[in-house]
Image (spheres, rainbow, N blue to C red):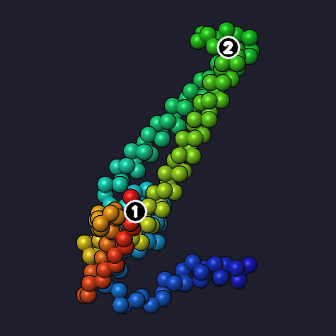
Amino acid sequence: MRIIFTILFISLFGNTYSQQDTLLSKSTQWSHPKKASVMSALLPGLGQVYNKKYWKVPIIYGAGAFLAYEISTKNKDYQDYKAQLLNVISGNSNPNGYSEQQLILLKNQSRKWRDLSIAGVVFLYILNIIDANVDAHLRNFDVSNNLTITPEPYLYQKYIGLNIKISIKNNFVSTKNYTYIWAN
């Protein structure tokens, strides 16, 4: 048992004392996907703040508030329909005028929507963690004007086509042209 705990401890915390890569620039050292994921797991939206994607936080909390409201109202409806159904089954009259079959249907429908809202909360939580991780991974992805795709119409005698030019500009200019031609 002691060996299992030792292996588990080393596997979880063993890389904490490993050497850091000194060739990384300062801009790449601050964005760690694991740290963003853990932060989002502890407090939803915190990983997005860490990645400086502040505009995503109100979306996460707005969707969470909506789902919490849905869970609350559907659970209240479920409890009400369940109490009414028990009242009808025991032989008392229902003040709302629903029959036993209608109450069974309404109770099951409310439970289904409540359960789907709970699944939505779980999905939102997981999506929040995945989003923080992906944003941290793509933080240094080059989206500058050095990467371009330019579609241009192509007309040569009786042929019509589309010329797609893909350019990657570094210290030297590298360009690839792809031409698609359709005949009349």
Amino acid on which disc 1 is placed: Trp
On the image, the x and y values in percent for residue 184 come to: 38, 58
Q: At 40% across and 89% down in the image, what residue appears?
A: 21
Closest to the camera, between mark 1 and mark 2, is 1
Asked whether 57 or 15 is in front, the reply is: 57
Q: Which residue is mark 2?
A: 99
Q: Say whether disc 1 or disc 2 marks the residue closer to the N-terminus.
A: 2
Residue at far front of view: 158
Does 130 sit above or below residue 65? below
Q: Work out whether residue 131 can be spotted.
A: yes
Q: At 34% across and 75% down in the image, what residue appears?
A: 177
Q: At 51% across and 57% down in the image, what residue appears?
A: 126
Q: Based on the displayed image, in which of its 4 quarters is residue 168 positioned? A: bottom left
On the image, the x and y values in percent for residue 16 come to: 49, 83
On the image, the x and y values in percent for residue 163 come to: 33, 68
Which quadrant would the N terminus be assigned to in this image? bottom right
Give SS at disc 2.
Answer: loop
Give SS at disc 1.
Answer: strand
The 10 Å Cα crowd at callout 1, few under 14, some 14 to 19, many 20 or more, is few
Q: Is residue 178 left or right of residue 128?
A: left
Q: Which residue is mark 1?
A: 182
